[in-house]
Amino acid sequence: MDAGGDVSKAGREHFVLVHGACHGAWCWFKLACLLQRSGHRVSCIDLAGAAGSLVDPNTVRSFDEYDAPLVEFMAALPDDGHKVILVGHSAGGLSVTHAMHLFGDKIKQAIFIAATMLPFGFQTEQDIKDGAPDLSGFGDVYDLNFGLGEDHPPTSMVLRKEFQRTILYQQSSQEDSTLASILLRPFPAVLPTARFGCVDDGVKSPVNAVHRVYIKTANDRTLKAEQQEAMIHRWPPRKVMVMDTDHSPFFSAPDHLLELILKSL
């Protein structure tokens, strides 16, 4: 989804919003509207299997397939100095970092909102500990789908409805969490095992050349505050900002989220 705005004028930016697991371009509707009202251009990406995608999540076999819509979008951007600001939420941070590896010269800034921020994907046990949600304290929270048969590993999963508000939206309005319960979709099982990267040659690496900002969510029950802190410590961004919200500030505090994003520029 791409919404207008004349980016030729001074101070106008092009924001590319990337959702997390189970979500889609739809989850940005409040923030996208606020950014547009501020005079910016906004593009919201539906990754493979999201509500706005025509792809069955059970058919996605690799992270590259899952992330293809963002990669194709970035590849199609003109090579005329036009740079975008990538914004990733939750697992969308993996997609943002992947794009930083591939298209660093087309990215002005990357903003991670309660997001997985790992330079090379889930490569180690420590990466999984820091960057993957541990929801075991809530019990059995996922419905699993077995697209290849019960004797094979699951092909997709989705958070059960009775846990969605408690884990994702406890500070959001009932209307927003109800909307989400209708639109959430299973995410491909390849996502929690995402691996990518390139040869790291220090400051010259494309992924290190992009300015990063991290927006922490202090009351997060999905990607806990200590996990966010661990990733920030391991791969320090240029700026860290904090919101006193749940995992989904695009619902629970969109105006404050807009304020922090604009301050980060």
Image: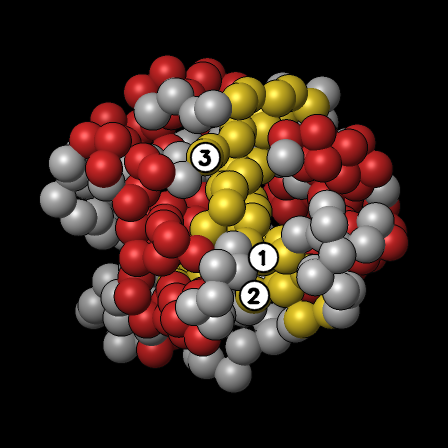
Q: Is residue 121 left or right of residue 131?
A: left
Which residue is at a point 29% across and 66% down the rendered structure image? 64
Quick one: SS at disc 3?
strand
| Quarter of the C terminus within the rendering | top right
Residue 68 placement (x, y as % from top left): 38, 70
| Quarter of the N terminus within the rendering | bottom right
Q: Is residue 91 left or right of residue 126?
A: right
Quick one: SS at disc 2?
strand
Query: Does 34 appear above or below 54?
Result: above
Q: CA distance from mark 3 to mark 1?
A: 15 Å
> Which label lies toward us, 1 or 2?
1
Q: CA distance from mark 2 to mark 3?
A: 21 Å
Q: Amino acid at mark 3?
A: His
Residue 87 placement (x, y as % from top left): 56, 47
Which residue position is annotated with label 1?
Answer: 16
Does any portion of residue 211 appear in the rendered image? yes
Q: Is there CB contact under 8 Å for labels 1 and 2? A: yes
Nearer the N terminus, badge 1 or badge 2?
Answer: 1
Which residue position is annotated with label 2?
Answer: 45
Q: Amino acid at mark 1?
A: Val
Which of the 4 quarters of the picture holds residue 56? bottom left
In the image shown, does 210 or 90 lie closer to the viewer? Answer: 210
Query: Does 197 appear above or below 228?
Result: below
Label drawn at residue 211: 3
> Which label lies toward us, 2 or 3?
3
Nearer the N terminus, badge 3 or badge 1?
Answer: 1
Q: Is residue 168 left or right of residue 146?
A: right
In the image shown, does 256 or 224 lie closer to the viewer? Answer: 256
Q: Is there CB contact under 8 Å for labels 2 and 3? A: no
